[in-house]
Image (cartoon, helix red, strand yellow):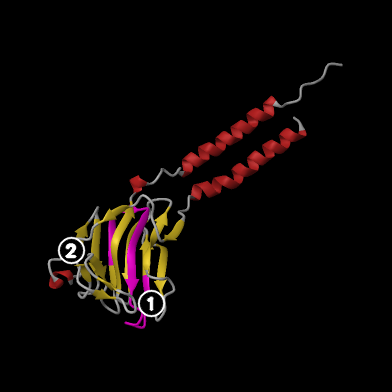
């Protein structure tokens, strides 16, 4: 075997050894986003009147989405004017809002999502707590969060949400302050490309090793005639 071939085979083995544990873990890549390409819009049904809009839920809407809230003052499908001081009023487009200084609105998904986006705003002065949006997986573990800092925005209001390499998002909570959302869009599991599983990565790495072995044999030095 030539020196060049030995070095090549050793590099293949090293890469395979390092890549296999990483591939077997297959961690999800979390990203806070302000846009979501290829997403599907989800309509929030408009409430018949203001009294109907105030509800704890549960309300099922869209493709397997469920709204619940810890506060009876929370709003679902509200279309009248709603002010987020010092921002402009929301009106006309159905919204979901906590409408209380403390509490939690939860959106749960029957099938985990790979992406979620909505137009979001919050008052800054209604309570002493920071408004926070949090994404969870099926196990209840926190995937990521977005913070609206009390008495000053850490994140400016607007379109924001979460995007993942795989369908991980099982529920999203909107907590504290008078936080609201509207114009929802989502990415479901069938809207993203397939991600190789750990066994697939393992087979690919074994294939690399076999390719290295074949190349080693092909480059083997033959004895020269005297």
Residue name at image x 26 percent, y 56 percent: 42
Q: Residue furthest top?
A: 225
Residue, disc 2: 46
Within the image, what quadrant is residue 79 found in?
bottom left
Question: Which mark is drawn over residue 12?
Answer: none
Left or right placement of residue 82 versus residue 86 in this view:
left
Task: Name above or below for residue 221 compared with residue 5.
Answer: above
Q: Quadrant of the N terminus?
A: top right
Task: Name above or below for residue 196 compared with residue 163.
Answer: above
Residue range highlighted in magenta:
106-132
Label 1 crowd (10 A; few <14 / some 14-19 / many >=20): many
Label 2 crowd (10 A; few <14 / some 14-19 / many >=20): some
Mark in front: 1 vs 2 = 2
Within the image, what quadrant is residue 140 found in?
bottom left
Residue name at image x 39 percent, y 58 percent: 35
Between residues 148 and 208, which one lies in front from this camera angle?
148
Residue name at image x 33 percent, y 75 percent: 87
Residue, disc 1: 130
Where is residue 165? Give x, y as percent: 43, 51
Residue 91 visible in the shown view: yes
Where is residue 169? Give x, y as percent: 36, 57
Is 113 a magenta residue? yes
Q: Main secondary structure of the magenta part?
A: strand
Q: Secondary structure at mark 1?
A: loop
Where is residue 14? Give x, y as percent: 64, 43
Left or right placement of residue 130 versus residue 70 in this view:
right
Q: Earlier in the sequence, mark 1 or mark 2?
A: 2
Task: Name above or below for residue 157 compared with residue 222.
Answer: below
Residue 111 visible in the shown view: no
């Amino acid at each position: 075997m030539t020196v060049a071939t030995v070095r090549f085979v050793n590099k293949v083995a090293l890469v395979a050894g390092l890549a296999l544990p990483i591939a077997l873990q297959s961690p999800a890549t979390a990203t806070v986003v302000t846009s979501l390409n290829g997403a599907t819009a989800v309509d929030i049904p408009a409430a018949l009147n203001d009294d109907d809009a105030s509800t704890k839920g549960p309300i099922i809407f869209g493709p397997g989405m469920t709204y619940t809230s810890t506060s009876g003052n929370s709003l679902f499908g509200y279309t009248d004017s709603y002010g987020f001081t010092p921002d402009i009023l929301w009106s006309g487009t159905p919204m979901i809002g906590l409408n209380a200084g403390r509490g939690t609105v939860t959106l749960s998904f029957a099938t985990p999502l790979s992406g979620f986006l909505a137009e979001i705003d919050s008052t800054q002065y209604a309570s002493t707590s920071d408004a926070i949006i949090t994404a969870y997986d099926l196990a209840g573990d926190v995937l990521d969060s977005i913070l609206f800092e009390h008495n000053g925005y850490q994140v400016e209001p607007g379109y924001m949400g979460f995007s993942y390499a795989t369908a991980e998002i099982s529920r999203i909570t909107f907590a504290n302050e008078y936080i609201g959302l509207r114009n929802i869009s989502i990415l479901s599991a069938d809207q993203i490309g397939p991600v190789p599983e750990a066994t697939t990565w393992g087979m690919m790495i074994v294939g690399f090793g076999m390719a290295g072995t074949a190349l080693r044999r092909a480059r083997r030095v033959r004895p020269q005639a005297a």
